[in-house]
Amino acid sequence: MSAVQPTLAAQAIFPYFNEEHKLFRASVKEFCKREIAPRSQQWEEEHQYPKEIFRQAGALGLFGIRSDPDWGGAGMDWWASAAAYDALRYTDFPSLNIGFMVQADLTIPMIEHLGTSEQKREFLAPAIRADRIAALGISEPGCGSDVAGIECSARESGGDLIVNGQKLWITNGAIADFIVLAVRTAENRHKGISVVLFPTDVKGFSVGRRVNKVGHVASDTAHLFFDECRIPARYILGERNHGFYYVVRNFQGERVALTLLVLAFMDRAIELAVDYARERKAFGVPLIEKQVWKHRFAEHVANIEAARWLTYRALDLLNRNEKPESAVAMAKLVVCDLAQKVTYDCMQVFGGFGYTTEYPIGRIWRDMRLYTIGGGTSEIMKEIIAKHQGY
């Protein structure tokens, strides 16, 4: 039993959370502590985790939280997703969480919003069950946040599409059964991009390498190549040449999910650090009794709570299908920048033990560095905020 007082999120006293959300959160927490946390160190050392863990998460309902029950989803809302992300902190293993996030909130929503009934039968329902693992193929060696700069292309040939090019920084890329792939289908910079469903068993597709990263070492981040890959033209999602706008719209859910994930791991870092500070003595006194640490934790908890409400404001707008772009950018900017200091200080409490991957705090500190980059850099968030302010 943790000696830390539960955070407000853990108590689920926010007015947006109902009893169903609280029960779901409890089941996700129990799953994380039973099936993932005890094996996280092994998977960390092996730099991979088994695909089977996706299927277990799918059986729990993690990948269809907001999806239509007709396709195997739970038909809940974004607040249920927030409850799940809060509980996912108990994996103590961000490498896996980011893979889950790609499945749940980067790929499945695009198929559900844009797909035909045939496409949903073939791709959506199996993805919700995690019978098929998905990746999102947007970034390339020459473009990341600049979606309009995509060069990976698809041309028509006899009722099919022939895909050529490459993608980089693709989470789940090496283990994916299919990719929600952005390709150029016309010369127009913004109105020349389409989104297609790309099965990875197609001839000409190859995984060049898994990228060796500073953090998230067990999450496969792949460099993908497409060489005259033929797929049916019926695999186009939504309207041809409207892909840029679909991707940008999908960014809002991606960034909210990512921000919720980082919030959860800040809470987890505080829990771990305070528990350790209660036990660890320096000069005969528990560290938690040192004023410097009391004040530091107090400051972090206050800042996290402010960041949480900013995030929940963005989440509320997204959940009501209102315009969330500026609020989402603010939340991501504030939360992901704050996580750098919170997790740094929490690791500092552990001294030399914190600078190992044998303690979860070391992994959390290291892995949180990604989030001022992934999903749109902090600099891009500032550009979005400035644009909405009329600067």
Image (cartoon, rainbow, N blue to C red):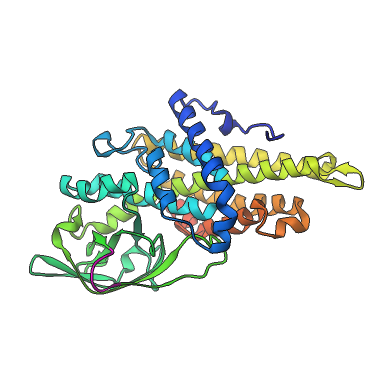
Relative vertical location of residue 325 with respect to residue 183 in this rendering, above or below = above
Query: Which quadrant of the figure contains the N terminus?
Result: top right
Give the x, y percent position of residue 268: 62, 43
Residue at position x 57%, y 59% from top? Answer: 44
Give the x, y percent position of residue 119: 19, 50
Relative vertical location of residue 137 with respect to residue 328 in this rendering, above or below = below
Determine the image quadrant of residue 279: top right
Q: Is residue 215 left or right of residue 353?
A: left
Give the x, y percent position of residue 341: 66, 53
Residue at position x 33%, y 69% from top? Answer: 149
Q: Is residue 228 left or right of residue 15?
A: left
Q: Residue furthest right?
A: 283
Looking at the rendering, the stretch of residues picked out in magenta corresponds to: 200-205
Residue 390 appears in the figure: no
Q: Residue furthest top?
A: 19
Closest to the observer: 184 or 245? Answer: 184
